Image: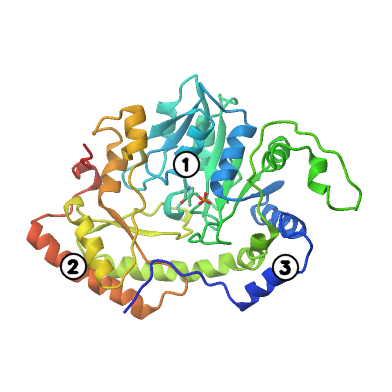
Amino acid sequence: MKVPFYRHDLAASDAAAIAAVLRTPHLTTGAVGRAVEAQLADYFSTRHAVLTSSWTTGAHATLMALGIGPGDEVLVPAMTFIASANVVELVGATPVFIDIDPETLLMTPAALAAALTPATRAVMPVHLYGQMCDMAGLRKVLATRPDIALIEDCAHCFEGRRADKRPGVYSDAAIFSFYATKNVTCGEGGAVVTNRADLAASLRSIRSHGMSAAAAERFQNGFYRHWDMERLGLKANLPDLLAALLPPQIKTVDARLARREELARYYEAALSDLPLRLVESVPDVLHARHLLPIHVPPQIRDKLIHGLNSAGIGVTVNYTAVPATTYYREKYGFACDSFPHARAWGAGTLSLPLYPALTRAQQDHVVDTLATLLEALTRSHRVHVSGVSEAPPQNFD
Ligand SMILES: *Cc1c(COP(=O)(O)O)cnc(C)c1O
């Protein structure tokens, strides 16, 4: 039985939405995108939403809009996708990694407080796997530092909430990804939601080369309009061809979360007797259930992945600790024992298939295969499951 790691559930009606854009003269950013921006601002109850070509370009544009650059520090968790740190590098600022909580794997207010320096200009908590960080707590830590922007990486958390608050409430900007495997997807895309009018206006300009606002309308009324370049920008707008896939998904994302939750609970119950660790649930969080990672002894992780792949099951690793990747390790010279929680998690984690179209039979195949492989591997390697903080650090020298 084949169990792909991910499968989207776009349908024939979605093809019709793209066909409708094909009948318009310009395929790029226009009326469809504007409607999706209004829908996003409504969903998150924020004043503004700006669509971008990806999370990465949205975050890059946000850091540019905030004037963050050389000499500035941006705090980023050590356990996240590399993009969270890469955008800081791209503007010439310094990513300062913060180790994660060993149980929830999130950035905590205490860890943030300990990492602040006079050079800190932004903090980027990541709602890892779909559980939201304590945004109210993080905002409180920054109460005396209005010079620091709070930016949420919401790539895993579109429909999640914490204490019934959605992303965007406590932050200067909350940034989303509509990449192929995300809970809401159009293949490639992103969005920034914000209550700050200054930030939204800058983002609209930066996503279009830094051109003046008039440029956006230059095709619209049949009369040529001169444009000016007001600042340095990117090319980071989302074409209507892709934006057309988003409205039905945003409308149904809350309803579809019930299916993800059901699948996740079934996994959690079935895996509870196996020698592996799951991420601890945060109380008062509505989990967006983007990924279902498990953690096994690092000595057997890659053999387990090979065994699952051999049985037709797609899995991925989310993620190797960012400071442990070659680029960051060599550039900043991190020691092997730095960021121990992120490194230990990264050395033993793998993610199981989780998407609404997954069937019960497929899930059972994943669980049964996992159980059989784990039994054989733990016996032959004589390993036992230990707390993540006790796991040996990844050896990358
Ligand atoms: C997917 C992802 C990103 C990058 O999103 P893109 O839209 O592909 O640029 C950033 N952060 C996290 C945590 C992600 O999972």
Q: Position of residue 202 (x, y in %)?
A: 70, 36
236 horizontally vs 346: left or right? right
Q: Amino acid at mark 1?
A: Ser
Residue at image point 71% right, 46% down: 48
Q: Residue at x 34, y 80 (%)?
A: 361
Marked residue nearer the N-terminal end (3 or 2):
3
Q: Which residue is mark 3?
A: 22
State which mark lies toward you, 3 or 2.
Answer: 3
Residue 46 visible:
no
62 on left or right of 213? left
Label 1, secondary structure: give it.
helix
> How far apart in space, not on screen, are marks 2 and 1 (Cα)?
34 Å
How far from the left and from the top, in percent, is residue 107?
A: 42, 40
Between 391 and 273, the one nearer to me in the picture: 391
Quadrant in which the C terminus is drawn: top left
Say few, some or many: other residues with alpha carbon within 10 Å of mark 1 (under 14 / 14 to 19 / 20 or more). many
The disc labelled 2 sits on which kind of residue? Leu
* C-alpha separation, residue under disc 3 versus residue under disc 2: 49 Å
| Residue 36 percent coordinates (x, y) | 70, 58
Which residue is identified by label 2?
Answer: 373
Query: Disc 1, ligand 1: is the CB inside 8 Å?
Result: yes
